[in-house]
Amino acid sequence: MAVPSIALPGQLLGSADKYFPGPGTHIHESQIYASIAGPVITSPTPKSTQTKPSPLLSIQRPSTSTDPGILGTGSGGGGTILPEVNSVVLALITRLGPRFATCEILVINNIVCRESFQGQIRREDIRATEKDKIKMEESFRVGDLVRGTVISLGDQSNYYVSTSENEFGVVMARSEEGRLMYPVSWKEFRDPVTGRAEARKAAKPF
Amino acid sequence: MATNTDRRRNNPPSGGTHAPVFARTLREPEYLQTLRPTRTRGPNELRRIFLQTSIIPSASGSAYLEIPSSSANSSSTLIPPTSSLKITASIQGPKPLPRSAPFSPSLLLTTTVKFAPFATRHRRGYIRDNTERDLGVHLETALRAVIIGERWPKSGVEVVVTILEGDEDGWWGDAHASGSGWGLLNVLAGCITVASAAITDAGIDCVDMVCGGVAAIIRNPDSRDEEDLVRVLDPCPAEHKQVVAACAVGYLASRDEVTEIWMKGDVGPDPDALIEGATHASVGSLAVVKEVLLEALQAKFQGQIESSQGAQKRKAQDVEMTG
């Protein structure tokens, strides 16, 4: 049976013996059905343990437009996307505690969220080495923009974010005077005018 | 009444939106009976349905459903002979749960059904009354079985349905008609259909598209026999003098499953026939929903392809300029 080019929820796409179910599909009685509306995409399975890999069936979600729309950002333009484990996020530090920093996840995998998600960066997740010597105030300040990865869906209200890799950490920080600073090392940002250095866990620039 | 407890707004006199009753309808009962609408379509024929999705830009998904009045407006009276059904649904979310909510591994569904104050002949309050809460619970059961909640952990979705014009319980000329509740079944079926279209528009994972349908058993108007009953699909309560029983279902056509049943009245020995009729009606409205959604999808993805092509063209031009 040919796979339909466009599918609506509940539409039969193919047998589960011949295809793998991808995002936007579900299996019912060993048949693959669509679960969202959109064009059907058949792609080769990236890594398969089987001798004969079956193609992956998935349904494309409409891409979110970069145009924020007439009502401004956060109204309609954003995608309905949830943080998942291993997704790379951009987050704004909102509060510092002795054991963890609270942040607001704004971007997930380069897609701007419709609504922000509350996240938490625990002190031991800030960097991978010398975890016992990490000091919160030498890593983040309120208002810093941080790139990190989600390590757990966390408890009832927070997603757990980690910055313990080189490319994760503060990407944008303002000095005490409020000027945008530039990173000079993995643990230091510098003010372009006064030249004063401030301690941060800096992300490795690309 | 709910309006009496609402102290936040300037409330109009309760019971306000009655259409004028003209003296002639009171003086001449025969004239009144000539205004009575009758069913002109076949017993298995549905009213026409208008549906559109993505009407509210700030919602993640939305839909509008209208079932226009089937009878032609008569020129001799200002009162519309039958009511029409107009419902909007908007989906808010999936969004993170509020801080106080406990952890939930799956999507939390909240449904709110509200009649607009002007939706029925009898004016509704601004605060939800028992009927509306009841409709909300019915709608929630119909939708809950369809949504694949495990795909959206720690998040909630709100389905907000506003009824702009509700089907009436009976013809306005029949004094006993209002309050019988026959119109609510049509409203529920419409709510299920429109909410399902909005959920699909929002891109929330569903097992199938659920659609609402109504069937009724009525006294045959052409027959003298009191016991002569007919089954009709999509009854417009104003067009039938006596509805004996009615049933609204939420039906998954491709799985042949029923997620919601609401039955009223004296069904008699064979309720299955009535339920089956309601599922037939829901298949009819499903055809409309499918058609509309396919059309919307094509438009949506057409635009996406064009915009990406446009971006590539612009990039190519940039390269030329720098080179």
Image (cartoon, coloured by chain):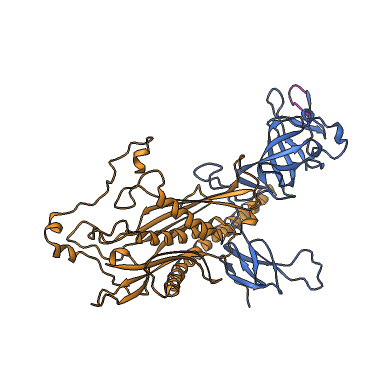
Quarter of image, res A173: top right
Question: Residue A8: horizontal and vertical position, in percent?
Answer: 56, 66
Question: Residue B76: horizontal and vertical position, in percent?
Answer: 17, 61
Q: Residue furthest right?
A: A130
Identify the image quadrant of the N terminus of chain B: top left
User: Residue placed at 29% from the left, 61% from the top?
Assistant: B170
The tint of chain A in the picture is blue
Question: Residue B102: horizontal and vertical position, in percent?
Answer: 63, 44
**Is residue A117 a member of the stretch shown in magenta?**
no
- Magenta stretch: dominant secondary structure: loop
Relative to residue A129, is residue A76 depicted above or below?
below
Relative to residue A60, is residue B272 depicted above or below?
below
Residue A160 vs residue A191, the one in the foreground: A160
Residue B290 vs residue A62, the one in the foreground: B290
User: Residue placed at 79% from the left, 64% from the top?
Assistant: A47
What residue span does the magenta drawing correspond to?
Answer: A189-195
Q: How many marks?
A: 0
Q: Is residue A65 left or right of residue B12?
A: right
Residue A140 vs residue B142, the one in the foreground: B142
Q: Is residue B41 left or right of residue B78?
A: right
Question: Residue A132: horizontal and vertical position, in percent?
Answer: 86, 33
Residue B41 vs residue B107, the one in the foreground: B107
The tint of chain B in the picture is orange
